[in-house]
Amino acid sequence: MRIAFIAISLKPGFDGVGDYTRQLSGELIRRGHPCSILGLNDAHVLEELFDYQEIAGTRVPVLRLSKALPWRKRVKMARKWLEEFKPDWVSLQFLSFGFHPKGLCFGLGARLALINRTAPWHVMVHEPWLGLDENSPVKYRIWGAMQKWIIKDLVNSLRPKVVHTHAAVYRSALSQERIKASILPMFGNIPQASTDDSLEIMSSLTKVSAGNLTSSLLVGVFGTIPPEWDPEAALASLHSYAQARQKSVILIAFGRCGPHGVNILHRLRLRWAQRLAVIELGFIDTKGTAAILSSLNVALATTPWTLADKSSTIAAFIDFGVPTVVTRDDVQYANADCAPHNPLVEKYKGGETDWEKVLEKRTTPKFRLPEIAELLQIALDNKL
């Protein structure tokens, strides 16, 4: 089965959907299914670029088309690329904000229909539209209504045989618009670390933390930190647990935390200077990220509880066997089963959180990419 993926931008480490698609393509190639990826709105090339990108030792052919190119030229080049590849499936990895800065990618369905007229479509809806939660302001509901129209138009234009999404709340929203979607679980985008990588990063952390690693609990925060994230109650509870056992707490923030994250981490340093160390590593490559994930005792998620199933950072924690505590419960949805289904993930419950039991959940890495790639393969096979 030959699968052509259409993503947004394909610079490794700079686009979550692109990284996801590359990982999935690499695994499917290893399973004997030729794959290729088109970056249809790439922000990191000036024109077009054909290349091979390597993931876990597997080379994936990619065509990257700059967002600066006129749509007519991109459509023509993408159609030629598809005709030469001769896919059995074309898989659109859809995220509205990837195709337009405000997520208002009007006309995308018609353009995509011109690119592929023969192979059946698969659509992965990474995020549907704004305004889904019960407390959304009117502005977001109006904005979301336009994005909803765009997705419905996209589905009407492409007539996909298979539609997937990551979260139950998204499946529910699509269902209400008569778009039948199934859940394809999220996997982490970070491959396993080598022993040498882990030793190197641990050595660096030992220097930064003044040699306190062996008597510390390493707490990870990965990726973008939104302004709504407030970890102080959980950190206070964890600090009390650690102090009673003559341990310290080291909070390690890694990945691009964003401007709000920088401010929150600075505030934590000032207010918690005598109680915990805050280490901000910023962006590091996948090997370094894997080494950090391998070293953590526990993680604090910045994603709301109701959206934990679609978080790529939580998926990475799960893959690396890191117990994850979700401290946000500020986004609510109606008529959806929103609870995460992985036992490594639990909601912070204030004084009821048993840190001993949380930490005991730490387990060896189990990378779910192969089984999730097989789920996609079976879903597509059943519709051919």
Image (cartoon, rainbow, N blue to C red):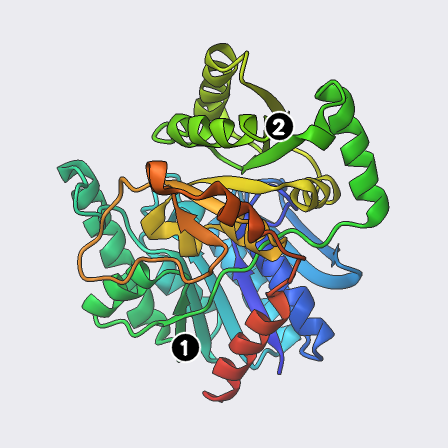
Q: Is residue 343 visible?
A: yes
The residue lying toward the viewer, choosing from 156 and 57, is 57
Amino acid at pointer 1: Val
Examine the image and state in which quarter residue 191 appears.
Answer: bottom right
Residue 170, percent from left and from top? 31, 60
Residue 320, percent from left and from top? 63, 53
Query: Which residue has dot 1 on it?
Result: 162
Relative to residue 16, is residue 345 drawn left or right?
Answer: left
Residue 66, percent from left and from top? 57, 46
For residue 247, the mark is: 2
Residue at 56% x, 42% y is 298
Q: Secondary structure at mark 2?
A: loop
Specify the quadrant that holds the N terminus.
bottom right
Q: How far is mark 2 from mark 1, CA to CA?
A: 51 Å
- Earlier-in-chain disc, 2 versus 1: 1
| Name of the residue lying farthest toward the right | 196
Relative to residue 65, is residue 53 drawn left or right?
Answer: right
Examine the image and state in which quarter residue 331 appears.
Answer: top left
Residue at 30% x, 74% y is 180
Amino acid at pointer 2: Lys
The residue lying toward the viewer, choosing from 152 and 319, is 319
Residue at 24% x, 56% y is 148
Residue at 42% x, 68% y is 123
Between marks 2 and 1 in the image, the one whose residue lies nearer the viewer: 2
Q: Secondary structure at mark 1?
A: strand
